[in-house]
Image (cartoon, helix red, strand yellow):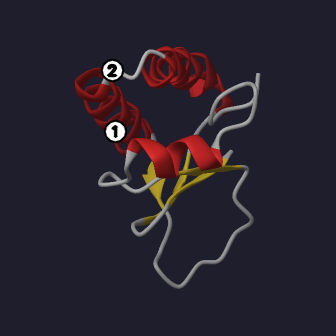
Amino acid sequence: MIVRIMGEGQWKLDDSHFAELNKLDDELLEEMEGGDEDGFRRTLGALLDAVRRLGTPLPDDALEPSELILPAPDATLDEVRQMLSDDGLIPG
């Protein structure tokens, strides 16, 4: 799967990492619903770090279709709320 972090680039991740990303996404959704700004910051950072750690960065000039688009690390709670579906940032 190809994951884009807005403002940073794209990473190729093995589908086997989906469960770990989805767990972090569920935590992020709970923190957002509860208005937990500190938890939101911490979990968003952990989610983005997991993509960077588990994935292989694509070259800057590569424009692959992204299956997931994640917010920039400095995104606000309101900006991320606008990106959410009922499932969170990661469907499933």
Q: Secondary structure at mark 1?
A: helix
Asked whether 59 or 75 is in front, the reply is 75
> Label 2 sits on what residue type?
Asp
Q: In the depicted view, which residue is nearer to us: 62 or 91? A: 91
Q: Which residue is mark 2?
A: 36
The residue drawn where x is 23% and y is 26% is 38
Task: Find residue 49 and report its image quarter.
Answer: top left
Residue shown at 30% from the left, 54% from the top: 74
Measuring from the top left, give residue 29's x and y in whole percent.
53, 22
The percent coordinates of residue 7 (x first, y second) are 42, 69
How packed mark 2 is, by other alpha carbons closer than 10 Å (few <14, some 14-19, many 20 or more), is few
- Relative side of 50 to 4, left or right: left
Q: CA distance from mark 2 to mark 1?
A: 25 Å
Q: Position of residue 84 (x, y in %)?
A: 65, 39
Q: Please tell me the numbered disc located at residue 53.
A: 1
- Reply above or below: 20 against 48: above
Question: What residue is rendered at 50% in x and 66% in y?
Answer: 58
Left or right, 91 with reference to 38 = right
Give SS at disc 2.
loop
Give the quadrant of the C terminus.
top right
Q: Earlier in the sequence, mark 2 or mark 1?
A: 2
- Indicate the amino acid at tag 1: Arg
Residue lying farthest to the bottom in this orientation: 61
Decide: few, some or many residues near mark 1? Use Cα within 10 Å; few <14, some 14-19, many ≥20.
Answer: few
| Above or below for 77 versus 74 | above
**Is residue 23 rendered to the left or right of residue 42?**
right
Which quadrant is home to the N terminus?
top right
Q: Residue at x 55, y 16 (%)?
A: 26
7, 49: nearer the viewer = 7
- Closest to the observer: 54 or 74? 74
Q: Is residue 11 left or right of residue 85?
A: left
